[in-house]
Image (cartoon, grey):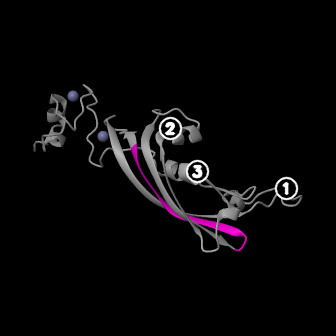
Amino acid sequence: MQVRLSNIPEDGRDVRFSKGGDWFFHLLRQEDGDDFSLDRIDVQCLLKKVRGNVTVQGEIVTEIDLECCRCLGMFRLPVRTEFDYTFFPDPGDSEEDLELSDEELGMNYHRDDIIDIDHIVVEQIILQIPMKPLCKDSCKGLCEICGINLNVVVCNHQTETISSPFANLKDFKIKKGK
Ligand SMILES: [Zn+2]
Ligand SMILES: [Zn+2]
């Protein structure tokens, strides 16, 4: 979704749209199914002109299917995230300050009088994807020996090493007094 500056009235413009996974991965220029997938994205936001700038505040709702980094099982992460962007007028190619400061690098500009909301949506969803996705905090993962999913069953390897509260005492030697 792209909105022209001239189509934003003085009291702001409410924008709502829904998109599918194809749309998202096309924008991301990435094949679906690499690390994650999603089916539906709902976006709702308010665009406002504030002097020469445009503010875009809103919310994105989606569900991301991810692979748990511990048990390798697929799970669904519900996402509801709010965003608040400010777009500044494009400074163009000024001869001065070719070196951008860190602050300027993080700034958004509206070019050709167009506010690109798609870009916000993709950026915000990517930010929601954890580096190490976990199906749940207490995920027990896979057995290092037989590879079985320990969330589902417990194998013999686990009962030997973990279930005994005295496992740590096994190597403990009692010194005999002389
Ligand atoms: Zn897991
Ligand atoms: Zn095992």
In the image, residue 177 above or below residue 114? above
Q: Classify the position of the C terminus by image quarter.
A: top left
Whether residue 66 is visible here, answered yes or no, is yes
The kind of secondary structure element at disc 3 is: helix
Asked where in the image residue 89 lies, by quadrant, the reply is: bottom right
Disc 1 versus disc 2: nearer the observer = 2
The foreground one among 62 and 104 is 62
Q: Is residue 155 magenta?
A: no
47 vs 41, left or right, is right
User: On the image, numbered disc 1 is attached to which residue?
Assistant: 93
Disc 1 marks a residue whose amino acid type is: Asp
**Residue in the picture at 71% in, 59% down:** 109
Distance from the alpha carbon under mark 3 to that under mark 2:
13 Å
Disc 1 versus disc 3: nearer the observer = 3
**Residue in the picture at 55% in, 35% down:** 30
Disc 2 marks a residue whose amino acid type is: Asp
User: On the image, numbered disc 3 is attached to which residue?
Assistant: 118
The foreground one among 58 and 94 is 58
**Residue in the picture at 46% in, 45% down:** 131
The foreground one among 175 and 135 is 135
- Please report whichever mark, 1 or 2, sits nearer to the chain's N-terminal start: 2
Magenta segment? 51-64
Disc 3 marks a residue whose amino acid type is: Asp
Asked if the residue under mark 2 is in contact with the one under mark 1, i.e. CB atoms within 8 Å, the reply is no
User: On the image, numbered disc 2 is attached to which residue?
Assistant: 22
Asked where in the image residue 5 lies, by quadrant, the reply is: bottom right
